[in-house]
Image: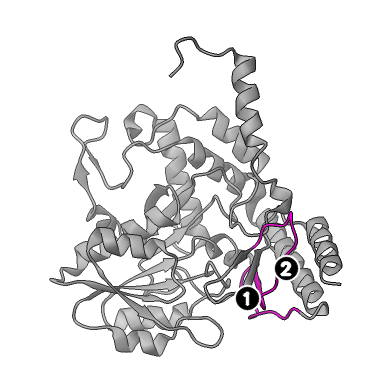
Amino acid sequence: MREKGLSSDQLFSFLLSKKGEDIDHAHILSSMCTLPHPVAVRAHMEFMETNLGDPGLFPGTAWLERLLIERLGTLLHLPTACGYATTGGTESNIQALRIARALGGKERPNVVIPESAHFSFKKACDILCLEMKTIPLDSEYRMDARAAEEMIDRNTCCLVGIAGTTEYGMVDPIADLAGIARDHDLFFHVDAAFGGLVLPFLPGAPHFDFSLPGVSSIAVDPHKMGMSTIPSGVLLVRDREALCSLMVDTPYLSTKQGYTLSGTRPGASVAGALAVLEYEGIEGFRDIVAGCMKNMRRLTDGMETYGVMRAVTPDVNVATFAPVHVPPPWIVSYTRGGHLRIVCMPHVHAGVVESFLKDFGEHHA
């Protein structure tokens, strides 16, 4: 630490020089996060000092969190859903498995998850001492529901399905899995961190939410397709009693019990997430999602014109292709199977897609 502090000009000159080394979003094609919506930024700035870890001190911000839960619960067909704002899918998934373990009462509990599950489930199982039973995918990179049912045993406490897989943008057969969970009296968690704010706005999208009676909890991330500031996730749970299985005493705070994983929790990103939902509404999100899907189709058509074929036709705006090199400065990623992966987020607009296709075509001419 410096003996004498920097001036404001010196400080921000230094900070902005480091930010200048970050990659410009105009060339980032691999991220499931995007530039935050202007209303999210403004709301975030207005609530910078709020701490939902001590909600009695910030009753207005705590009310906004409850409204955020209600808005997302209603969108996912359960206005009475309970839950709270998390730091994102990883925390939401950990908490869902904590609930499942607490409710299951198994001596040696295991969870059944698809091969496509986010790596946060490995973290969750390590932390919670859960055996992770991984189910292979079918030819379209979806979880094999029949194989999942065969893997369930007397120690299984949770079944997991993905709505918008990180690598291929696929939706598992959530309706079938929900039925299996009901048949076996299992807690069923749906990781919709990405798809949760895409699928509700897509015509003909597969059912994945609380409209299916077997779904116990859902993770959804406003800092992805919700265009909120980071960090912003939400865990929604059908049953308040299930959420309360996580309750611990918090004797020195303004509220005396809590079920969240993080202690200190930012109210700023909650305000940001809610701001975007309120500002855009169903109509706005429908247009945004339609635009992302249109750009993905254009990208796919363009790549196939160059002879680079899609790996699969996705359910959401994640495009994957045969392995091929991409020229700088474009930033892409590759799946575990080696496929080129591009996420058509709101910042990957039509102009970006055309610019990428032009550069790609010239590079491979």
Question: Which residue appears farthest toward the top when viewing the image?
Answer: 4
Going 39% across and 90% down the picture, which residue do you hit? 146
- With respect to residue 116, does 286 lie above or below? above
Residue 8 location (% of width, % of height): 60, 15
Residue 326, quarter of picture: bottom right
Going 28% across and 75% down the picture, which residue do you hit? 186
Q: Are marks 1 and 2 in contact (CB under 8 Å)?
A: yes
Q: How far, Cα to Cα, is label 1 from label 2?
A: 10 Å
Going 41% across and 48% down the picture, which residue do you hit? 86
Residue 329, quarter of picture: bottom right
| Quadrant into which the N terminus falls | top left
Going 32% across and 31% down the picture, which residue do you hit? 56
| Quadrant into which the C terminus falls | bottom right
- With respect to residue 66, does 129 lie above or below? below
The residue that mark 2 highlights is 296
Q: Amino acid at mark 2?
A: Met
Residue 71 location (% of width, % of height): 50, 52
Q: Determine if the magenta segment contains residue 291.
A: no
Residue 301 location (% of width, % of height): 79, 76
The region drawn magenta spans 308-332
Q: Position of 263 compared to 9: left or right?
A: left
Q: What label does residue 314 carry, if any? A: 1
Q: Amino acid at mark 1?
A: Pro
Q: What label does residue 204 carry, if any? A: none
Q: Position of 236 compared to 35: left or right?
A: left
Q: Position of 186 compared to 200: left or right?
A: left
Q: Nearer the viewer, residue 100 or 110?
A: 110
- The prevailing secondary structure element of the residues shown in magenta is loop
Q: Neighbour class for label 2 at 10 Å: few (<14), some, many (≥20)?
A: many
- Give the SS element for disc 2: helix
